[in-house]
């Protein structure tokens, strides 16, 4: 079904089209991420009213869910990278096959974690905590939450498949369904409202399970029944294309490995911050919350850019046009970073005022947010540049290697040294975020060499 008509992927487009497309694609993706953040935030608030032991039990379950998310996001990201290039070629048949293969892989990963978590919750909890009361609290939560992994992995791949063909609002609508059901059932099942039993932590797990089941059914209902762009049908799930299986494995490995690197970085960040006193940890928590909100916005922009880049490269656009695309990117995103950093700097006190913290914690939080306002500028350049141009343009393994080097040779060592030398808290935070600035120099060189332009399709 490969079509030689390249459409807008290879045609000329002005700067107005570039900016309009970025916003058209980025806003729904960012809203989807924001809704997902709201679901987790609401869960934490409601479970937090049950006491420390309940929070600890749910924390154990969330660590397993985070591992599933890292693997699933890697599969979904690889699907988007490959499928957008085939979308540029108008080769919908290959996109259907890639989606089918990704579904089987993600389903296998979800089933494995479901078996381990739902079948052996005590063993899993015991590996993550040596406190018997925490293990006992987490077992019923793990048993139920584990059943949701299969549904979660399937729905996320279906959302990724739609994103690859520019149906970006689909993921936002699916996330909104999950938000409404999850928060509503949490309120009813945790606290026993509207005639429902008060199940506490078990209620939270049951609410998540039901919302994930509905999310998966809603996604499958649309993709298999109504979507016209990919037109995926159950019969497409059989007889996977060997070449595309190899492509998904070859290019998916560094993407998943990159997610694992960031999981290690997140663990190290938590371990380093955990060495400080409670008031400083509270300040880091505030800075981390702002970082999450900024990341939601930046990742949406980077994902939108990646869709545009993959479509251009796969559609056979002239190198000169792709270079113009890269130049516009390098002009636009630093301005976004400057505006976002200025916003954080000006409104940091307003953000801090939402928290009931000591004056010393507020002072530390201001210092951390000042550092964050600076590093955001770097994030706005290197994150879309390396992810939305280099990775989406075909050089997938470079981003993994770059992240590996910065995390293990720069960020973690420098942060540990700063902490051991008893440097100011803001200096330790700067070390934890220094890669956001340093990667800009790497990105500047790599992007403008244009060796990342690689057609990953059959051609």
Image (cartoon, rainbow, N blue to C red):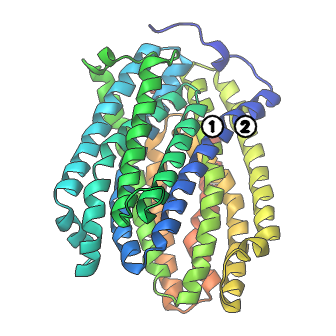
Horizontally, residue 112 falls left or right of residue 314, namely left
- From where the camera sits, is residue 357 visible? yes
Q: Position of residue 367 (x, y in %)?
A: 71, 80
Are the residues tagged 2 and 1 within 8 Å (C-beta)? yes
- Badge 2 marks a residue whose secondary structure is helix
Q: Position of residue 66 (x, y in %)?
A: 39, 57
Residue at the spot 76% in from the left edge and 62% down from the top edge: 341
Residue 394, compared with residue 115, is above or below; it is: above
Which quarter of the figure has residue 332? top right
Tell me the quarter of the image containing the N terminus: top left
Q: Position of residue 29 (x, y in %)?
A: 60, 41
Tell me the quarter of the image containing the C terminus: top left
Query: Residue 304, which numbered label?
Result: 1
- Badge 1 marks a residue whose secondary structure is helix
- Nearest the camera: 222 or 19? 222
Horizontally, residue 342 falls left or right of residue 90, namely right
Residue 289, compared with residue 80, is above or below; it is: below
Q: Position of residue 129 (x, y in %)?
A: 27, 76
Residue 123, compared with residue 35, is above or below; it is: below
Residue at the spot 17% in from the left edge and 66% down from the top edge: 123
Residue at the spot 48% in from the left edge and 34% down from the top edge: 159
Report which residue position mark 2 lands on. 23
- Nearest the camera: 66 or 55? 55
Real-space Cα distance between discs 2 and 1?
A: 8 Å
- Nearest the camera: 198 or 425? 198
Query: Residue 222, which numbered label?
Result: none
Horizontally, residue 248 falls left or right of residue 389, namely left
Which quarter of the figure has residue 21? top right
The tag earlier along the polypeptide, 2 or 1, is 2
């Amino acid at each position: 079904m490969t079509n030689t008509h390249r459409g807008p992927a290879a045609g000329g487009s002005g700067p107005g089209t570039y900016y309009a497309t970025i916003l058209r694609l980025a806003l729904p993706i960012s809203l989807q991420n924001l809704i997902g953040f709201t679901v987790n935030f609401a869960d934490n608030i409601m479970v937090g009213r049950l006491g420390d032991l309940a929070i600890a039990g749910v924390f154990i379950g969330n660590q397993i869910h985070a591992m599933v998310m890292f693997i699933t996001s890697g599969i979904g990201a690889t699907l988007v990278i490959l499928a957008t290039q085939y979308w540029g070629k108008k080769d919908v048949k290959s996109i259907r096959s890639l989606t089918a293969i990704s579904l089987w892989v993600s389903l296998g990963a979800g089933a494995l974690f479901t078996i381990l978590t739902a079948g052996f919750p005590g063993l899993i909890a015991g590996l993550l905590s040596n406190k018997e009361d925490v293990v006992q609290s987490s077992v019923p939560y793990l048993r139920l939450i584990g059943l949701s992994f299969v549904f979660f992995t399937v729905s996320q791949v279906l959302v990724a498949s739609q994103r690859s063909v520019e149906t970006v609002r689909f993921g936002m609508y699916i996330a909104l369904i999950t938000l409404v059901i999850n928060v509503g059932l949490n309120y009813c099942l945790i606290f026993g409202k509207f005639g429902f039993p008060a199940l506490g932590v078990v209620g939270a797990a049951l609410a998540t399970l039901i919302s994930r089941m509905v999310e998966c059914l809603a996604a499958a209902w649309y993709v298999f029944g109504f979507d016209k762009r990919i037109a995926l049908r159950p019969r497409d799930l059989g007889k996977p294309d060997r070449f595309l299986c190899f492509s998904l494995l070859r290019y998916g490995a560094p993407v998943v490995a990159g997610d694992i690197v960031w999981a290690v970085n997140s663990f190290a960040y938590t371990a380093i911050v955990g060495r400080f006193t409670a008031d400083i940890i509270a300040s880091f928590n505030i800075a981390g919350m702002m970082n999450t909100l900024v990341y939601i916005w930046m990742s949406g922009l980077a994902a939108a850019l990646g869709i545009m880049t993959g479509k251009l490269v796969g559609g056979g656009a002239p190198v000169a046009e792709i270079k113009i695309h890269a130049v516009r990117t390098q002009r636009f995103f630093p301005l976004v970073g400057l505006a976002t950093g200025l916003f954080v700097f000006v409104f940091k006190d307003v953000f801090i005022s939402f928290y009931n913290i000591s004056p010393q914690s507020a002072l530390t939080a201001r210092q951390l947010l000042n550092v964050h306002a600076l590093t955001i500028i770097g994030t706005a350049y290197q994150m879309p540049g390396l992810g939305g141009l280099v990775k989406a343009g075909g050089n997938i393994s470079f981003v993994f290697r770059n992240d590996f080097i910065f995390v293990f040779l720069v960020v973690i060592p420098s942060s540990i040294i700063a902490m051991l030398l008893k440097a100011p808290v803001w200096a330790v935070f700067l070390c934890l975020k220094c890669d956001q600035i340093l990667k800009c120099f790497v990105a500047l060189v790599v992007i403008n060499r244009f060796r990342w332009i690689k057609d990953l399709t059959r051609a």
